[in-house]
Image (cartoon, helix red, strand yellow):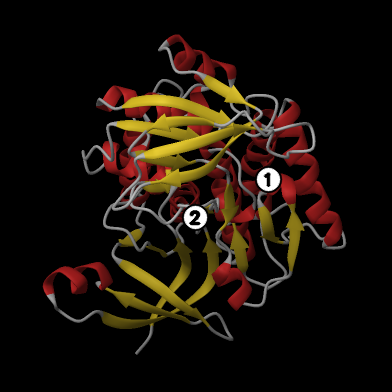
Amino acid sequence: MPVTTDVVVIGAGPAGLAAALSAARYGASVLVIDANLRPGGQLIKQIHKFFGSREHRAGVRGMDIAQQLHGEAVAAGARVWLDSQVYGVFHGGALEIARGGLEEASTGRPAVKEIVQPRAIVLCTGASENALAFPGWTLPGVMGAGAAQTMINVERVLPGRRVLMVGSGNVGLIVSYQLMQAGAEVVAVVEAARRIGGYAVHAVKVSRAGVPILTSHTVARALGLDGVRVAEVVELDSAWNPVAGTEKALEVDTICIATGLRPYAKLATMAGCEMAYSSPLGGWVPVHGEDMMTSVPGLYVAGDVAGVEEASTAMEEGRLAGLSVVEALGLADASRLAEEKRMARERLRDLRIGPFGQMRSDAKQALVRTQGGRKG
């Protein structure tokens, strides 16, 4: 017999836990499913303190926010299945899930197949890292910045001693600083654009530690036999072409790639959601209304799968999706929810102030218009 529930939230990151908490608080039966062994998504490897407002837990470390959100969601009545992989979304919203996949790999005990039939689904599957191909990019020692961050902050393993970071967005800058905290030497940060992509507060911390940030540069190739030994970087001209004679050889054993994220929307595609391409939001995004519902009735999105932004934005979208599900299922009167939804949208607008935020806000509005103005 299938497991029945009001809401299934796929993904236990900041968006998913916030959605689960919002829905469970109003009496919805909520099941959160995540493939990892720990809840929190990207938050569990963020050892730095958040900044911003009290509503977004300023001054609290990301890993602590993960514990808080998980504890609050469970206290509100949500169930959480970890080590559980959703591999099918079928007509009528039925989900097929393999529980214990990671345990199976380590113990040999077979994963258990479950069928879950929810009344609504909130997809919070996050994003995946963009790759960067160059000669030698398959050598051991070339990895995503997220993988390096997991190694140092979760597994307590240093990925290398001398590191080249490719990309100066917030991820590249923050992970560079955390690598130095963990004992690695960051030889340089290279950025293909003319300007640093991340916040100045992060760039200043890295540069003050003596790390050169080379704008208008990229990695040309990696050299080594059984692993990275040398990274060759090169300057780029205004047309993004390598400038001959500007090559520099850097002795490194690790190259971290921080060249952006893209929404991880495979389940949305499988479910038949209308998709739209948005460069500011990271790529192909499920089209969704202001209440976060996609073109598939009863299927909502929140967080990076709905467009790559920040963790605080993901939490607000999760809250909005959870409240919208409660309203759609008739578990609370619309007038009772109106003020909470208004405040969530207001906080989202505040988070999107500034050039990068406004660009993403405009991209979100374009998605709503693509959907014919439907508000969910």
14 vs 98, left or right, is right
Q: Residue furthest front?
A: 245
- Pick the residue in front: 158 or 318: 158
Position of residue 279 measured from the top left corner of the image (x, y, whole percent): 73, 49
Count of all numbered marks drawn on residues in the image: 2
Amino acid type, callout 2: Ala
347 vs 60, left or right, is right
Residue at image position (60%, 47%) is: 317
Give yes or no for contact between labels 2 and 1 (Cβ–Cβ under 8 Å): no
Q: Which circle, 2 or 1, is nearer the viewer?
A: 2
Badge 2 or badge 1: first in the primary sequence: 2
Residue at image position (46%, 63%) is: 10
- Pick the residue in front: 312 or 225: 225
Position of the N terminus by quadrant: bottom left
Dot 2 corresponds to which residue?
A: 23
Dot 1 corresponds to which residue?
A: 338
Which mark, residue 317? none
> Crowding near pointer 1: few (<14 within 10 Å), some, many (20+)?
some
- Pick the residue in front: 93 or 98: 98
Whether residue 130 is visible: no
Amino acid type, callout 1: Ala
Position of residue 157 measured from the top left corner of the image (x, y, whole percent): 21, 40
Q: Residue furthest top?
A: 208
